[in-house]
Amino acid sequence: MVNIFTEGFPQDEKQMAASHIANEGERKYLLDEIPDYASLINAGLRIPGPIKNNEYLSEIFECGFKDFISNFDIKKRVVWDVATGPEAFAIVNSDAQIVKTAAVKFENENPLGEIFDIDVYIVHGDTLGSLNRKDLHLQPRKCLICDKTAEECIRERNHSVEELQAHISKLINDYKK
C-alpha cells in the first residue's frame, strides 16, 4: 500500500488562511454570474495534516468532481490545483436543495465521497448563502474513522493526523485497485 502523504509540499496555517480568503474571493467574484434558480458548488477535500495536495489527491479530486457534476447542467467551472488542496467551483443550472441533496448522497455513497467536502450556495440578493445538511434536516457529517460526527471528533481530537491519513491512504489505494 502506498502512503500518499509522502509526497507534496507541507502547508502551514498562514498558507491555509490565505487559501480560505482566496476561496471566499472566488465565490464573491462568481456571484454576478449565477442566474436565478441556479446554484454555486464549491468542492474540496477533507485532508488532515500539512500535506494537502499531491499527484494522488489531485487525480482523485479530478475524477470525483467530474463524476459529481456529470449529472448537472454546468454554466461555468473553475478548478484550482494548488498546494493548499485541489478545489473547484461550478455554477449549475439547478436548485440548491437538489444540488445539496446530491452532494450529501455523493459524500455518503461514492467510494471516495467521504473525503470530499461539497458546499452548495444559493444567491440571496447580492450575497451567497450556504445550504447545509441541517437546512435539509439531514444527519451531520460522520467522522472519517468512527461513527461520531466529524465536528465532534475534530473538537475532541479523537484521532491523530497519522490515523486519519492512514485511513485516507487505504481508501485511495483500495479505489485504485
Image: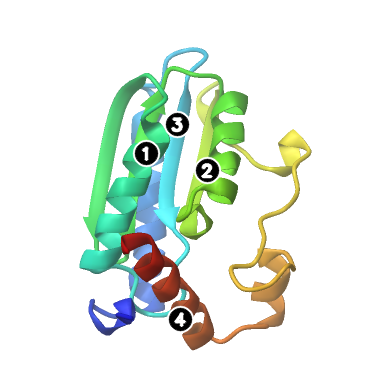
Task: Name the residue beneath numbered marker 4.
Answer: 166
Q: Please state which of the two labelled residues, at mark 1 or mark 3, is closer to the viewer.
A: 1
Q: Are marks 2 and 1 in contact (CB under 8 Å)?
A: yes
Q: Which mark is residue 40?
A: 3
Vertical comparison of 35 with 1: above or below: above
Q: Earlier in the sequence, mark 4 or mark 3?
A: 3
Q: What's the CA distance linking mark 1 and mark 4?
A: 24 Å
Q: Earlier in the sequence, mark 1 or mark 4?
A: 1
Q: What's the CA distance linking mark 2 and mark 4?
A: 22 Å
Task: Name the residue beneath numbered marker 2.
Answer: 106
Q: Which mark is residue 67?
A: 1
Residue at the (38%, 61%) spot, across then down: 175
Vertical comparison of 6 with 137: above or below: below
Q: Position of residue 62 (x, y in %)?
A: 28, 49
Vertical comparison of 127 with 45: above or below: above
Q: Given the image, on which type of amino acid does mark 3 rest?
A: Leu
Q: Position of residue 138 (x, y in %)?
A: 75, 42
Q: Given the image, on which type of amino acid does mark 1 rest?
A: Asp
Neighbour tally class for label 2: few under 14, some 14-19, many 20 plus, Cα within 10 Å: many
Q: Earlier in the sequence, mark 2 or mark 4?
A: 2
Q: Nearer the viewer, residue 144 or 32?
A: 144
Q: Are marks 1 and 4 in contact (CB under 8 Å)?
A: no
Q: Given the image, on which type of amino acid does mark 4 rest?
A: Ala
Q: Earlier in the sequence, mark 2 or mark 1?
A: 1
Disc 2 element? helix
Q: Please state which of the two labelled residues, at mark 4 or mark 3, is closer to the viewer.
A: 4
Residue at the (72%, 80%) spot, across then down: 156
Residue at the (41%, 23%) spot, across then down: 72
Q: What's the CA distance linking mark 2 and mark 1?
A: 9 Å
Q: Please state which of the two labelled residues, at mark 3 or mark 2, is closer to the viewer.
A: 2
Q: Given the image, on which type of amino acid does mark 2 rest?
A: Phe
Disc 1 element? helix
